[in-house]
Amino acid sequence: MTEHFRNIVRILNTDIDGNRKVFIALKKIRGIGFIFSNAICNHFDIDKNMKIGNLTEDNIKNIEMLVENPAPLPIWLLNRRKDFDTGKDIHVTTSKLRLSFESDIKKLKKTKSYRGLRHAWGLPVRGQRTRGNFRRGKSVGVTKKATKIAQAAAGKPAKPTKPAKTEKGAKK
């Protein structure tokens, strides 16, 4: 096997370093994660610690075929179950994954759903609070003392402050 070693292996339009272990190297492909990589190795009985540069052309073609058509794998491993457009369970990788992600966000924005509006406004989508985090580029939540001073220096009238509270029974 060492005579067939390749320094760079190309799988699904992704160049992978041949010195990496198969299990780790498959995770470099966009859309293939820890569990899916493990399932590929188990399906073809490939040693996970073997270098990916030692794989034969047949092994690489089999891996590509399995990723493009993952029918033998369980449905819960797929990253796009019940696709909105086709209604099928598919696994999307590489540039198709990025395009489907962008089209999903555009669809949310077009329907003006809550998530779509949050995407359009550049705010967090999944219910996080915005008072302390996500403060870059926009003013959300509490204004800081430095901005109040800057507004006062610019000549903008500051909001009137409340008079100091006095204790009950104290004479003015």
Image: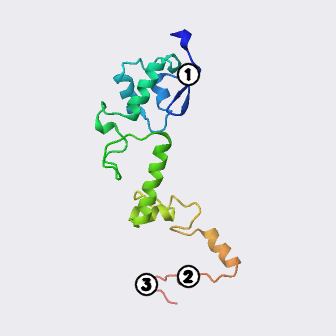
Q: Quadrant of residue 16?
A: top right
Mark in front: 3 vs 1: 1
Return the residue nearer the eye: 153 or 124: 124
Q: CA distance from mark 3 to mark 1?
A: 80 Å
Q: Tell me what residue is drawn at x 59 percent, y 20 percent.
A: 7
Q: Residues under labels 2 and 3: Cα distance?
A: 21 Å
Image colouring = rainbow
Q: Residue at x 61, y 81 (%)?
A: 158
Amino acid found under the numbered disc labelled 1: Gly
Q: Is residue 88 above or below residue 29?
A: below
Comparing 165 with 120, the one in front is 120
Query: For mark 3, what is the residue?
Result: 168
Q: Say which label, 1 or 2, has the lower sequence index.
A: 1
Circle nearer the viewer, 2 or 3? 2
Q: How much space separates mark 1 and mark 2, taking CA atoms?
A: 67 Å
Give the percent coordinates (x, y) of residue 39: 36, 28
- Name the residue nearer the viewer: 111 or 39: 111
| Image side of residue 124 versus residue 158, left or right | left
Name the residue that disc number 1 marks: 18
Pick whichever, 46 or 71, lies toward us.
71
Image position of 88 (left or right of 61): left
Label 1 or label 2, whichever lies nearer to me, is 1
Q: Which mark is residue 61?
A: none
Q: The residue under label 3 is which amino acid type?
A: Lys
Question: Where is residue 59, by image quadrant?
Answer: top left
In percent of width and height, residue 145 lies at 61, 69
At label 3, counting other C-alpha atoms closer than 10 Å, the crowd grade (few under 14, some 14-19, many 20 or more) is: few
At label 2, which amino acid type do we have?
Thr
The label number, if any, that marks residue 161 in the structure image: 2
